[in-house]
Amino acid sequence: MRAFSYERVSSIEAAARAAATTDGAKFIAGGTNLLDLMKLEIETPTHLVDVNGLGLDSIEATPEGGLRIGALVRNTDLAADERVRRDYALLSRALLAGASGQLRNRATTAGNLLQRTRCPYFYDTNQPCNKRQPGSGCSALAGFSRQLAVVGVSDACIASHPSDMAVAMRALDAVVETVRADGTKRSIPIADLHRLPGDTPHVEHVLERGELITAVVLPKPAGGEQIYRKVRDRASYAFALVSVGAVVHPDGTGRVAVGGIAPKPWRDEAAEKELANGAKAVAAKLLAGARPTEQNAFKLTLVERALSAVLVEAKG
Amino acid sequence: MRFDTPAATNPIDQGKVIGKPIPRIDGPLKTTGKAIYAYEWHDPNTRYAYGYIVGSAIAKGRIRSMDVAAARTAPGVIAVVTSDGVGELKKGKYNTAKLFGGTEIQHYHQAIAVVVAETFEEARAAAALVKVDYAEEKGAFDLTAAKDSAIEPEGGGDSGAGDFDAAFEAAPVKLDQVYTTPDQSHAMMEPHASIAAWNGDDLTVWTSSQMIDWWRTDLATTLGIDKDKVHLMSPFIGGGFGVKLFLRADAVLAALAAREAKRPVKVALPRPFLMNNTTHRPATIQRIRIGAGRDGKITAIAHESWSGDLPGGGPEVAVQQTRLLYAGANRMTAMRLATLDLPEGNAMRAPGEAPGMMALEIAIDEMAERLGLDPVEFRIINDTQVDPENPERPFSHRNLVGCLRTGAERFGWQERSKQPGARREGNWLIGMGVAAAFRNNLVLNSGARVRLDREGVVTVETDMTDIGTGSYTIIAQTAAEMLGVPIEKVAVSLGDSRFPVSSGSGGQFGGNCSTAGVYAACAKLREAVAQKLGFNRTDDLVFADGEVRSGDRRMPLAQAAGDEGLVAEDLIEFGDLTKTHQQSTFGAHFVEVAVDVATGETRIRRMLAVCAAGRILNPITARSQVIGAMTMGVGGALTEELVVDKKRGFFVNHDLAAYEVPVHADIPHQEVVFLDETDPMSSPMKAKGIAELGICGVAAAVANAIYNATGIRVREYPITLDKLIEELPEIS
Amino acid sequence: MQSPGALEISRRDLLAASAATVTVASAHSLGHAQTKATTAPQSTKVTFTVNGEGRELQLDNRTTLLDALREHLHLTGTKKGCDHGQCGACTVLIDGRRVNACLTLAVMHEGDSITTLEGLGQPENLHPMQAAFVKHDGFQCGYCTPGQICSSVAMLEEIKANIPSHVTVDLTAPAEITPAEIRERMSGNICRCGAYSNIVEAITEVAGRKA
């Protein structure tokens, strides 16, 4: 881990300013992903801006009937919130399927959205990785890729996004609120937050330098049966091979977002129109253009079957 | 004390302390953070420096040059010791790959430098500044590709009896299948760690070692110093499972770094280094052929295994159990060893039998099905009480049949559906599986010193280690039983090279052998006590309740100690009983699984092990060894695989997130039954090993249960859902 | 909460390869890039309480809470198993909540109240959870044990506070103490010796005594 300077900030403006004006600055909140990567010198900030003193840790009702979730609300608290459990069960379920009790106690809402891939080559600094070191090549393409993405990938990168929470947020049409270094605010629909790798897999989202996530807003409850099905090798404390987050209404319509298969939470509104035609039809659309490796081609079948099980469960 | 005739009745048979469910005597230390592990030794008057390892970035080749200028001038740096700088160091006897020294790279993450700094943070940062110019060479990393080049290992190893080929050819029912097991990692919780301190030519090392004397010898060899100059301490070890049997890089680096820095230095291997820097259980390809008559009697059995290792290494002896487990007049086994440039393959919990039983016990299940026999019955039909390759040589004691029958009854085996894929509960396909457990009982000489003081306190000293096995407790029980004192009066000191050399911990020999060594020392102390107290007769001596009794005479034990105390030291030396009699341990594993009909995820619902392994010295610690082994077996069945990058030549998933060992949620309540038995051929303790028996067969029982649940036979471990999903039933 | 601006591109020529030989930088250094050194101090004073005792430390910013406890305060009950949040051996309680001490910087805990295993009980005065672990043999090598015990104490409080888990059937009903709940909630604490079955029994006993 490289040496870095450290400051605690107590206002959002100060945080954004500090991050924008100091070379190599990064925000730190829960730190559960950032410190992991700093120890391996995959992340090498020279200055850390500790935003834990900013508040941003409450969950409030919005005038539109939704919830505004502070960026620093810990995963445990978000999952345990009465309103989330009642009206956004999908989100609660997704959070509880992720990591461990200890990690959920630290990890924040914003940090969870921005966590980085678990591709083993990204984690090993001796190995070529276009995401870690642009231009060095992708070791995973011809290497160990069982966990990695099958859709949204490029020749440069097949890393998958590891978040469970983000899958639920995607299905629930969450909107990310930020403050930029110049103090201006903006709202980014979650669908637009993450970028696909293309030729620049090291650029993972649309946030600008110094731009701070302040909240994630959920629209009014979607209703329906809300199910999060995470498929993994181990029964707990493991990243998803595939996960399905679904909202299914009594009339058979609904929404589906899938995790573990793409560089971002994967959702396709056109696929959802096929819900009445069953899992096969939905999966065919969702996975159109998939480019699996020999090692992760099973995910195509797995998505379809997991979705099928979710639809059966939703019917009750 | 020589042990070359079967044990007669002895004080251990009293069973006043031995065999009792006594909680671990080190429990209060371990549960309060007071047990001190290697990296934690702290003398407030010492300024420790921190060493951080640099590992090779390539799998095979040479170091052309190393640029350590930036590291040397980084903040806090005291010294940088490089592999090319120290030159060639002599390799220890027990290592295949060299741990440090020279310019040759034999495997990924091989240690090539250690950076010493005032703080851990500074050492770690500076280590990242070391730049290396490598000349990379092509290596062999793929066992399947190297299989045809594999040769008979040094020392041979092929075995046989009768005429396998003819008998197999003639057999009316046959099986010929190939099974594979992957490279596996010990993944113990405490990473390798050492603190080294020099005082002139004398070296003291606090480390995490299963075998004190092996480490001490090899460390002295590596450093080119006299063994007498090395003092090793390892009183608590955070797990080993074989990876701490042999000297490792942390101790070498700490010693070299401390010499260079002229200060005590602490070195721990970072977790992401462990899988490639140390050793692993090698992958195997195993071919098994079985022929049987329609009566279910095996007439021909063959087991061949291919594995790989670095030049100078050895094979994974996966055929070992097949020479002994089932009857059959015509048989053969063979092992072939390929050269691979992966990290060193070596012992991991039950080397040989663990992967061998993973394959053999699926094959037996398949064969039973072909014969239309219940797999429990098929195993019983083919039981043998003699070494099948050498029928004049009996087993010392063998109750495999008892294990199978007891287990079947306890587990409700009759509820198992004979038809695979027939039992469903909601979204779960339910199945039951069985496998035999088998592991040889090894014996190693073991010494101990026993001291009696005037308070009647007995202190045992031996370089034996407790890697979680319960050594502290069973050694205290042994001394208490032998000398007739309550266990509270026994103090046990372990893991120090100043103490008599013991068997150490490995190969499930530690429990039986180290207590037998303590038995020998206590027997000697009893003689000294008797003499001191003036007992003329020794044939009716009783040590009980803190007294020594003979006839009508009784004397307090403590009185024999006098002011100076009384000391006895002895060694148990094993004779030929393992040659005249085959000594093995036996068991049966029963498993019930549920397989998700949609996704193929397998979850374990019930587990039972029945073990026949001689006298159980302490049913609490013995049971823990077995449930722990069952847990590791579940990992081997379902998730554990070191994935080889066949291009770059390393294990890719080299941390605890990517190499998935079982977690709480994977493991149900586990049942263990010990059959009541003793084995007088094994030692005066009449005990045998248990810690490795517990893993042998577990994975196959899981595999067989998955087959029973789904009708899908997977012969490539681990049995992950991708190997099931295309054959699972349609869902809608 | 990272911004892409901080992602650096480093020299690709490090990987220039020919067929037979290749020159690469050693471990770690591939990710290196030149960054402007900051002049701000790289150590910070932090004050917190550990097991009820006030502590003040001037620490290298890089020091994790785990290393602050082990190397600076010599409270080595808290273990370093992986240093990457993958095993749970370093679990401590911060203001009553369990966290991985390896994945948080010590300087981020100004004013916090930290409880380690040493703060729960002593060999002669065991906490009920420590006593139950001894009784049920909920450990073998003992290295994951401090994390298991700290985690289980906090985990029972989480159930009491009605925090749900992955296996909670009804999210709108109060959380219950069942073996399945305990297993799921304890899954962030790996025990390679495989004492899980016994640990669950130890926790169940303590939970029953409390209920």
Image (tube, coloured by chain):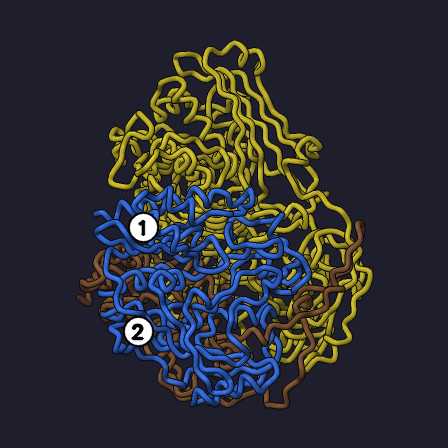
Chain colours: A blue, B yellow, C brown
| Kind of residue at disc 1 | Lys
Residue indicated by mark 1: B20
Dot 1 falls on a residue whose secondary structure is loop
Do we see residue B508 in this rendering?
yes
Please tell me which residue lies in front, B230 or B131: B131
B434 vs C105: above or below? above
Q: Amino acid at mark 2?
A: Asn
Discs 2 and 1 lie in a common subunit = no
The image shows residue B221, relative to residue B693, as above or below, that is below
Q: Residue A108 placed where, x, y %?
A: 40, 73
Q: Which residue is mark 2?
A: C125
User: Which one is nearer the viewer's eye here, B236 or A228?
Assistant: A228
Instruction: Give x and y (percent) for residue B25.
Output: 38, 61
State the quadrant of the N terminus of chain A: bottom right
The picture quadrant where one finds residue B160 is: top right
CA gap, disc 2 to disc 1?
25 Å
